[in-house]
Each structure stands twice: as structure tokens, then as C-alpha cells.
Amino acid sequence: MKILSLNIGTPTEIEWLGQKMITSIFKNPVKGKKKVTFLTIEGDEQSDKRVHGGKDKAVYSYSIEYYDYWKEALDRDDWVDGMFGENLTTVGLTDDTARIGNIYKIGTARLMPVQPRFPCQTLCARFGLKEMIDKFYHSGRNGIYFKVIEEGYIGEGDVIELDEESEHDVTIQDIVESKVTKGADQGKLSQILDISFLPEGIRQNLNLYLK
């Protein structure tokens, strides 16, 4: 597992469906090392901090394996790293292998997966597709939001090494499936809700499906 590309972006004003919006989803690959703090990556800036960034969404990763899926699903040829707004374009780290509470050493930083991404309209604007949220939601390829456990420096080519294994048998994919199926697997849903550090927004959402 490793970082193929480190991507950062700043607020940009765009027009989508006749309305202006400011978004930081347009991220570009950068060379060299960047500092990862408890809230963000050096040089990266979120536009709406009510729903983006913060300690439980400090770093977002998306697997290059998922790009292969989207290249088949979408008819376009302008693919670039960071296209999904991810800070880290990775290889080998997918939603079904990243357990909530695992701690990964990347460069000199230590990061913990805590939740998947559920996108907003900015993803539609990025791809110029009104139906992109629906396509993304049903693809089962959401990507990983990390909490920073130890600040440090990361960059393109850094190995992603499992440093501590989680005590919870819950993956990012499990959370996605619990939301999409509205808690069809009540046993797995209970396991998820038993995680003490589960981000509050995810907890409130999934609590709706507990019977």
C-alpha cells in the first residue's frame, strides 16, 4: 500500500446549474512532503467547514482501483489524480480492507480511518453530472476519511503501513452498507454503534436504523 499522489486544493468559485458555489473539490497533485496536522494537510483548505475538514475528516483518501471502475462507468477521458477531491490517491487501501480504528503509519504521520465519505452537490459539479451523487452512492466506492493520531509529514510514494490493528471488526465498507441498506444487518449495525470514537454525525444517522 502506498500514496500514488498527494493532492491539495483551495476554495474556488464555480457555477453549477445556474448557481455560484465555492468549493475546494478541485485538488491538484503536489511534489515533496507536506505537513499533516490534526485538522488538515498543509496547503489544503476546505470551503465549508461545517461539513468538510475537522478532526474526523482531516484527510480523505481514494483508491486508484476505484478509478478503474469509474473509467468503465463514465464516458470521459480527462482523468487526473485527485479528481474525487481526495488528498491521497492510494493503491492497495480500499474501503473493504480499512478497519475503523486501524492506525496506519504514512511518512512520519499516523492516521486512523473513522468514516466513509458521503458526498454533496460539489461532486456533481466536479464531474458535470447531476446524477453523480446517486452513481457514487450506489457504487460502493466511497473512500476513507482519516483522523490524525500523530502529526507528521507525508508525500507521494510514501508507504502506507499498518502500525496498529483495530480491536473492532468493522470496515469502512461495513458503514457504507449499513447506511445504504438502512441497517439490514442489525448485528453489524450494533457493532458499528458500539465504537466509542465513531463520529457523531455517522452515529446519529445510523441510529435511525436500529430496531
Image (spheres, rainbow, N blue to C red):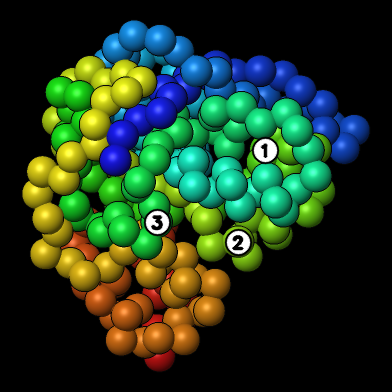
Q: Which mark sits nearer the N-terminus, 1 or 2?
A: 1
Q: Residues within 10 Å of mark 1 (few under 14, many from 20)?
A: many
Q: Which residue is mark 1?
A: 122
Can the viewer see residue 133 in this picture?
A: no
Quarter of the view holding residue 95: bottom left
Residue 196 higher or lower than 91, as above or below: below
Q: Is residue 8 left or right of residue 137?
A: left
Q: Is residue 153 left or right of residue 145?
A: left
Q: Which residue is mark 2?
A: 139
Residue 170 higher or lower than 47, as above or below: below
- The quarter of the image holding the N terminus is top left
User: Helix, strand, or loop for circle 3?
Assistant: loop
Name the residue type under label 3. Asp
Marks 2 and 3 sit apart, C-alpha to C-alpha, by 12 Å
Q: Position of residue 81 (x, y in %)?
A: 55, 28
User: Helix, strand, or loop for circle 1?
Assistant: helix
User: Helix, strand, or loop for circle 2?
Assistant: helix
